[in-house]
Amino acid sequence: MRLVTVGVAGSFPGPSSPASTYLLQAHDGERDWNVVLDLGNGGLGALQRHVDPLDLDAVALSHLHPDHCADLSGLYVYLRYHPTSGATRTGTGRRLPVLGPAGTEERAAAMYGLQPGESMAGEYDVRAWQAGSPVRVGPFELEPFSVFHPVEAYGLRVTGPSSVRPGERATLVYSGDTDLCDGLVAGARGADLFLCEAAFQEGRDDDVEPGVHLTGRRAGEAAARADVRRLLLTHIASWSDPQVPLAEAREVYDGPVELAVADGVHEL
Ligand SMILES: [Zn+2]
Ligand SMILES: [Zn+2]
C-alpha cells in the first residue's frame, strides 16, 4: 500500500502544506482503493493532485479539531453538486463512509451551516469509531485506539496489502494528535511505518498541560517503546523549525526517522 502525505502542517495550514490530510491507496486485485486519513484545512485542494474525490472509498477522522476535519465541508459540495456525478444530478447518491468520533455528523453539518431539516445523509454515511473494533474498507482494515488529547481522539492502526513485500500485509500506524500514553505505544506496536505527530518542542512547550501534543523526543520514545520499523514525523506548525523535533527524536530512537513533507509518497 502507498501513503501519500498530502497535508502535513500542524494545527493550521502552512505556506507550503495543507493541514493534516493523508491518502492511503492499495489495489486488491480488482481495483484501486482510496482512503483518506483526516481532511484538514486545505487538504481537499491538494488531494485532487492524487485522486478524484469521487473515487474515495472512505474518510477516516482521528478527531474533530478543524485542522483534521475542516474540509469535510468542501468534500460535501463536491459529492453533492458535481456536474455529472453529484448526488443531486444522478439521484443515486453513492454515500461515502465517514468514520470518526461521536458527533462527527453534527460537526460537519454545523461547519457547513446546514439549515434545519437538511442533512448530509445523501452524501455521507457517518459511523462512530469504537476503540478496538476494526473497520474493513476493501483491502484495508482500520483499527482505532484511544489517545491522549483534549477531545475524543483516536490513533489509527491500518493494515493493507504490502507493495514492497508481495503477498504480505503491511501496517501503518497514525498517531492523530496525542501526548505520550500507553495506548499510543500499544497501538503502534511493530508498525512498518509510524506516522506520528511532533508538534511541540522540549523546553519551549514544557508549561503546556499534559495531554495535548508530543514533542519530537516523546514521539521518538513512543517509536522506540513500540519497536516500529520507521518513524515519520508530522503535524509541525509553520512557527516551528522542523529540524528541532527531528533531532529530538533521533536522540532516543535508533531506527530511520524522516520528516513528512507535502505530497510525499511512501510505499510500505
Ligand atoms: Zn492537530
Ligand atoms: Zn487536535
Image (cartoon, helix red, strand yellow):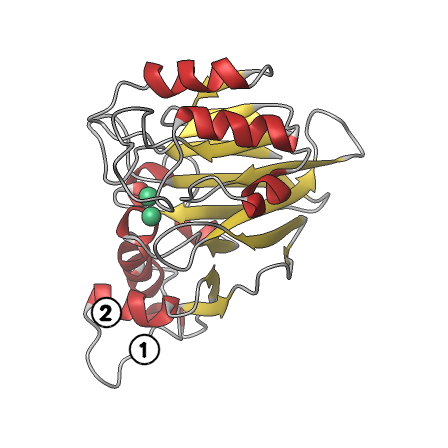
The residue sitting at 40% across, 44% down in the picture is 177
Q: Residues within 10 Å of mark 2 (few under 14, many from 20)?
A: few
Q: Residues within 10 Å of mark 1 (few under 14, many from 20)?
A: some
Q: Which circle, 2 or 1, is nearer the viewer?
A: 2
> What's the distance in space between the residues labelled 2 and 1, CA to CA?
11 Å
- In the figure, is residue 62 to the left or right of 236? right
Residue at the far right in the pictured view: 167
- Residue 33 visible in the displayed image: no
Q: Amino acid at mark 2?
A: Ala
Residue 191 at x, y percent in the picture: 65, 33
Residue 168 at x, y percent in the picture: 78, 34
Q: Nearer the viewer, residue 56 or 11?
A: 11
Disc with the residue nearer the chain's start (2 vs 1): 2
Quadrant of the frame with the N terminus: top right
Residue linked to disc 1: 119
Residue 23 at x, y percent in the picture: 47, 40
Q: Secondary structure at mark 2?
A: helix
Q: Is residue 149 above or below residue 47?
A: below
- In the figure, is residue 44 to the left or right of 179? left
Q: Nearer the viewer, residue 265 or 94?
A: 265
Q: Is mark 2 within 8 Å of ligand 2?
A: no
Residue linked to disc 2: 110
